[in-house]
Amino acid sequence: MLRMMYQALLTCSLVWILTPRLCTYADSRLARNRFTSRNNAGSTQTQTTPLVQELSPSEFCDALTTSVRMGVNSSEAFHDHACRPNAPGVLHHIVQENNLESLALGDALVAVYRDTRGTPHEILALYLLLSCESGTLHPAALSLAAQCLRDDDAQKAELRVGTAHARVTARILTSLPIVCLFVGCLVSSSLRQSVLTPAIVSVLVLGIAINAAGWFWMHRLSMSISRTSHHSEFQRFTFALCVALHAGHSLVSACTTWRYLSPIGDHIARELEEGVSLHAALTPLADNFGQPGHMLSRTISESAESGTPAISVAARLLADARSDSRRHVEFQLRQLPTKLTLPIVFCVLPAFLLVALMPFALAGLTSLPSTTLT
């Protein structure tokens, strides 16, 4: 009996130590396979292409800024960098497939943005389009776009670090009952003999279902932070306005660039093009975004009336938008440990009782000698 208990304790200790490392190794292998398959897509069996490190959107903007500041024509610089093997994948594919070199730079950027809608490079295409004024890419706008993209990457990295504990917790707590049941079947002959009885099968099915629900619940909680941390439509309005102002647009012209963002921006742009006053055209901001939209509308209107330099207005708006986004991410990360207690209490713990403990109890009851009442 002591020997069996020692073997069970040793096995559980090894499983407890090796499970996180095995999960990490499996994740790294899956990520490596995805990366390899993505880089090998389109290659033939007879000819292989060397592995090239793809530039991030911020690095692409920095490279384009350097070329423009060195005196290279904006259209030539864009097509040269977009056709290089290390260009962002979607952008490289669109420029090569559609043969955009024959178009003017503005029309080419509009076509690129239209084709990248719904892809990870949509924001990059939008910033490139907003940085173009009169067929020329402006280095100041490109530098601001690169800074915004770097801030986005830093925020995503912070979210991955902040939610790593939640992902590991979900992985370990939901796999532990299954591991304990497997170990129990190895060390207990009575459990192996009675594991297929209707009572134990029913308990296991219920426990595994609750365990799966707990994993899905915790996974949704960690993923919801990543979804809600993306820039809202209002923040995209602010970033687009700032990039357009640094590209040399006036306040009215910068507001007309909102047509690429959403139906609300398209409505504001059409109102301005029809000659409606700036204050009246910006009314949908307050109607759709509440107090932040009202503050943005009032700031733009007051700047246009007082003649305040547009660049200073853009810097203040961008700082406010970044601080709001940072506060929102910190608030979500601080709430995550508290939210995780609900699936742990209502799903993980009951599943552990049903999967890891109840089969032993039922197997012990079925193995008792039967008695007859006289």
Image (spheres, rainbow, N blue to C red):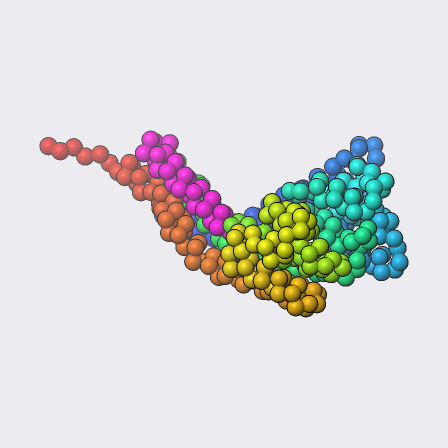
Could you say where residue 230 lies in the image, as x and y percent from the top left? 58, 53
Residue at image position (34%, 31%) is 197
Residue at image position (75%, 47%) is 88
Residue 322 in view: no
242 left or right of 185 in image:
right
Residue at image position (87%, 53%) is 73
Could you say where residue 145 lies in the image, as x and y percent from the top left? 71, 57
Where 52 falls versus 370 (above or below)? below
Main SS, magenta region, reads helix
Determine which quarter of the picture holds residue 46: top right
Residue 55 in view: yes
Determine which quarter of the picture holds residue 198: top left
Toward the viewer: 374 or 230? 230
> Is 319 within the magenta?
no
Could you say where residue 201 lies in the image, as x and y percent from the top left? 36, 34
Where 196 falls versus 273 (above or below)? above
Of all residues shown, which one is farthest toward the left? Answer: 374
200 left or right of 213 in image:
left
Toward the viewer: 92 or 125? 125
Residue at image position (80%, 32%) is 45
What residue range appears in magenta? 196-222
